[in-house]
Image (cartoon, grey):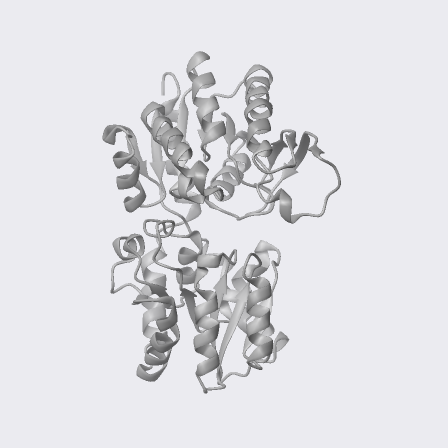
Amino acid sequence: MRILVVQESDWVEVGPHQSHHLMERLSQRGHEIHVIDFEIRWWAHKKNGFFSRRKVIWNYHKAIEGGNVTVIRPAFIRARILDYASLIFSHRSEIEKQIREFQPDVIVGFGILNANMAIRLARKHDIPFIYYIIDELHRLVPEKPLQAVARVLESRNMEAADMVLSINESLREYTIMMGADPDKTGVIRAGVDLDAFNPGDWKAIRAKYGIRDDEIVLFFMGWLYEFSGLKEVTQALAKNRDSKIKLLILGKGDLWDMLQEIRRVHGLEDRIIMEPWVPYREVPKYIMAADICILPAYKNEIMMNIVPIKMYEYMAAGKPVLATSLPGLIKEFGETNGVLYAESSEAVIDKAMELIETGDIGPEGKRARNFVKLLSWEKLTDIFQQTLSRGMPGG
């Protein structure tokens, strides 16, 4: 198959997400993958010039060695609002170019605006379009006034797509509420690679940061969004006098400077360890070095129905997860599978103390791993490949 992917986030900088894992594995199986993406956080990069030219990245992989994806980044204007306006023209032109030259058998959309263009062009050229939802997309648009418009477009995309896939059941219900035909919806969850988690890897990481065997490490990885809850967790940690409780954060983003300031003001440099991104193949070592993983996100509209892929990776490492009581998480994992819930971000540290005192870290970690052990990426890729094939003419 020749598969064209369209999205409005940065394929190179963010993730790996569901899309990276599935597409790179499909490429290993001989399928050709072209991705049209957008440098969504262009304003955070110090680059000269008002105009960003078209760029092609060949043989790119992020999730697995041997993945082979061609990433095309159309030209755009580096100015707020004008970036979206220019995207309308450059992405439409690029999609037309890919249909003409790459001749995709199927188009998979992960965005809103360019997905809308792709659906129209796919219909014109009799190409099936699969809409894959891993977030309530319109809520992620940073410009609040544009979210209402984005919601309308997202809804129309769901109504018009040949199939709408979701990463969990809560999001599937969301797509139906937004207009997707229930008979054309499905769920393909996130996967795990159990072989990536080596029990011996924890020692080197803990030694690197001077963490003793008798110290308890809470771990968070990912983009440091304002709503990640990490500000509240670090403030709660400052009030906790047990010096054996440490927090290891792997990632970067909006809260980086604020968290560094909290460390400095409260003298927590030895208890809050912050590390920017590392190569993805190194990430399992960091998770293995932890005792408890956390997802202390705010219970806001963005987070209510999603299940971040990091949850499955935490659980695959055999770590209990402390999370705020988000409906999507509760629906996905229940309350007896190694995921424990706090009512708020501030309460995560107290919940961790309870888990430590009861001595249930090990048993809860085993429950977590047992829950995800059947969700292998290879099996999920089989399902995704079959789904794409069924969507093609004659499939």
Residue shown at 60%/24% (left/top)?
90
Q: Position of residue 108 (x, y in %)?
A: 45, 30
**From the viewer's perspective, is residue 211 above or below residue 332?**
below
Residue shown at 62%/31% (left/top)?
72
Observer-nearest of 293 and 283:
293
Outermost residue to the front: 145
Is any part of residue 386 visible from this angle?
Answer: no
Residue shown at 30%/82% (left/top)?
358
Relative placement, left or right, of 146 versus 336 is right
Outermost residue to the right: 48
Q: Position of residue 330 (x, y in %)?
A: 27, 57
Relative placement, left or right, of 42 versus 195 is right
Q: Position of residue 216 (x, y in %)?
A: 46, 79
Residue shown at 55%/60% (left/top)?
283
**From the viewer's perspective, is residue 271 above or below residue 91?**
below
Q: Quadrant of the C terminus?
A: top left
Q: Quadrant of residue 179?
A: top left
Q: Quadrant of residue 349?
A: bottom left
Is any part of residue 252 visible from this angle?
Answer: yes
**From the viewer's perspective, is residue 32 above or below residue 231?**
above
Relative placement, left or right, of 177 versus 48 is left
Observer-nearest of 367 and 208:
208
Observer-nearest of 148 and 372:
148
How many numbered badges does the structure rendering display? 0
Q: Position of residue 14 (x, y in %)?
A: 55, 47
Q: Quadrant of residue 232?
A: bottom left
Relative placement, left or right, of 258 versus 132 is right
